[in-house]
Amino acid sequence: MEAGEPREPREPREPGPGAETAAAPRWEEAKTFSDKLVPKKKPKSPKPQNAVTIAVSSRALFRMDEEQRIYTEQGVEEYVRYQLEHENEPFSPGPAFPFVKALEAVNKRLRELYPDSEDVFDIVLVTNNHAQVGVRLINSINHYGIAAATIFSPSRDVAVSQSQLRVAFDGDAVLFSDESERIVKAHGLDRFFEHEKAHENKPLAQGPLKGFLEALGRLQKKFYSKGLRLECPIRTYLVTARSAASSGARALKTLRSWGLETDEALFLAGAPKGPLLEKIRPHIFFDDQMFHVAGAQEMGTVAAHVPYGVAQTPRRTVPVRQAPATQ
């Protein structure tokens, strides 16, 4: 038959034995390929009033040391040029990256149990903006008392859980007010112990991170109601320099009065927190004192400094009085 000559129509034939079996793998292969081309439907963003909003800076989420060096040493134009040249190269994970991954793991479990619920973590990436906007943001945060902390990179990398979010809190000036720390600063430990014993049944006022623990507790209860207390993907810790025997009761009774709890309460009686945090391996640890933040860093823990309370007050130095000059 010459090229271009019309063909006679053929009668359709029934597929022979085994044809259906042979076609099945090809269909599955084609379907798999097609599925890869179609973008998966992403979960709908929750309304801010329903979600637990976590804001994380770009320099905490990713390692940007080289970019920051270029910006500092060579200026903004070279910084922009470098970013454009490397825009297809992903940043390496930064200190907050495992924390965010754990939040996503919790969200996945929550959506499996409560498909229509918006009571999840909403993660917001914050990056640099105009300086004047930054000042206004800081002023707004101070006005409303929104909890904030500065994340510090650990001195070495330590593996953390990828399936369970672990958050550790200091007590005074973090979960609680700095009432007790002020007494220590002003009158010493002996007066502090007397004060805590006398006020054991009086709850402490709330600190800046109380709301975050409250939000974590609310999400934990969603798992508890499904009979998953032991399998809950959120675990919280109170890690405090208080002593269990002399001042721990007030901390626990304060949490109880709020209807809150932590999975573990660790009273170190002034001992360093770093070694214990190395055993717990939290994704993040909040403390108001840089001494404890630095100790956590040394042991590989991502620590966040909470700029609240009397510990932030700079010490006043007494000026040296010079003798009057003699004639």
Image (cartoon, rainbow, N blue to C red):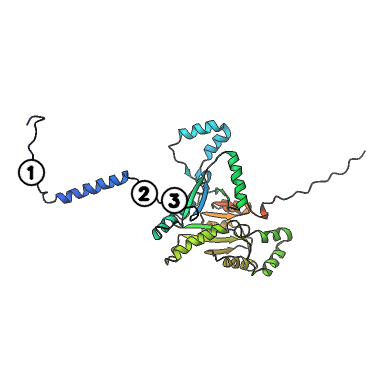
Q: Which residue is mark 2?
A: 41
Closer-to-camera residue (184/327): 184
Q: Earlier in the sequence, mark 3 or mark 1?
A: 1
Residue 39's tag is none
Residue tagged 1: 11
Which kind of residue does numbered mark 3 sit on? Ser
Q: Position of residue 146 (x, y in %)?
A: 58, 52
In the visual, does 314 lie left or right of 132?
right
- Residue 241 is situated, as x and y percent measured from the top left of the image, at 62, 61
User: Residues under labels 2 and 1: Cα distance?
Assistant: 44 Å
Q: Is residue 98 visible?
A: no
Q: CA distance from mark 2 to mark 3?
A: 12 Å
Give 325 or 257, whichever is nearer the viewer: 257
Q: Name the kind of residue labelled 2 in the image.
A: Lys
Point 21% across, 49% down: residue: 25
Q: Name the mark on residue 45.
A: 3
Residue 298 at x, y = what percent? 57, 51
